[in-house]
Image (tube, rainbow, N blue to C red):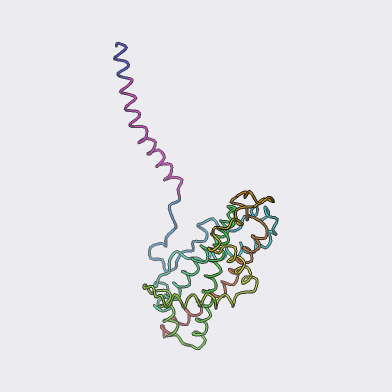
Amino acid sequence: MSGYEKLGVFAAALVVFVWLAPKLMSLVLGSAASIAAPRGRPTNPPGSDLPAEIGTTQTPSGFARYAVEAVGADWSDAADINTTLGYLQQSRLLAITRDDNALRSLAAWKMAVCRQSALYRLVALSEAATIAWNSRNPVGAMTATIATIENAAVFCSYAQRIAQHAAAPDLAGLEVLADAHGFSQAFDRTAATQDSAQVLQGLRTLPPRVQTAYERLSDLADPRFVVRHQLFGTLDKTGSSVCFSPEESFDKAVFELVLAGMSVIQIIEPALEVFDLAAAKLAERDAA
């Protein structure tokens, strides 16, 4: 074989290799990913009456000790928040079906669905706050903490209304609450305005420590101050230079505000129990 023929064969082989290499690499990586990646959340076994817990299927989120001690804060307080968050995580369910004897009542089932919906939201927001802090993103932690407090305030206010109906007893009123807040598809701006007032009302019922943290965090993260440099920059003594850093606000004072705000999740469990009581009363009525 002449030199030109050898060169032609080599060139042809090179073209084939270039064409095949990406496909082979994609096949190999796809196979590896299918082995390493999780298969998703577990589902209820066919015919199962009870929803499966999902708390043990995910790595619990919470404040990381290194991120707490990095700013000189007390780990024990953060550990208490982590314990509560872990409990709430473990309380989430994969599904709530009316196959369960206790939830054959449509009204009781709706109440249980509302409970789980709130629980998922509060856990998600709490996780967002802790993950942001662990990532040395203090502004992200602030905004997630504010959202956690606001949602917790509405949830607790909602639970108070449910408790009042359950104690009356006004079971028809419980059904109205579940339908209006948990299963209404339309967005009602009038109701939204009322809900905003409910946030303010709920905030007044929160522990003073949480209220103070909410007010201070809201001041720091107020969108009206979006162009101010203080959260991310330091002005030098000459007033002629600002040095920026994404971790400028990653300090003990800010963490203590975030921690105080996050302590709101410690009052969620009693509110959840109110929903359980209401569902039980509705189920008892419909079983009669």
Residue situated furthest bottom in the rendering: 168
**Rendering coords of residue 96 (x, y %):** 43, 69
Q: Residue at x 32, y 28 (%)?
A: 16
Q: Residue at x 45, y 66 (%)?
A: 51
Where 70 falls versus 45 (above or below)?
A: above
Where 197 falls versus 250 (above or below)?
A: below
The quadrant of the picture occupied by the C terminus is bottom left
Q: Is residue 30 magenta?
A: yes
Q: Residue at x 60, y 63 (%)?
A: 220
- Give the quadrant of residue 284: bottom left
**Rendering coords of residue 134 (x, y %):** 59, 54
Most foreground residue, 160 or 198: 198
**Is residue 194 left or right of 213 when viewed as pictured?**
left
Most foreground residue, 211 or 102: 211
| Magenta region, residue range | 10-37
Most foreground residue, 158 or 139: 139
The quadrant of the picture occupied by the N terminus is top left
Where 84 falls versus 244 (above or below)?
A: below
The rendered magenta stretch, by its main secondary structure, is classed as helix
**Rendering coords of residue 243 (x, y %):** 62, 48
Most foreground residue, 161 or 167: 161
Q: Is residue 48 magenta?
A: no
Residue situated furthest top in the rendering: 2
**Rendering coords of residue 89 (x, y %):** 53, 63
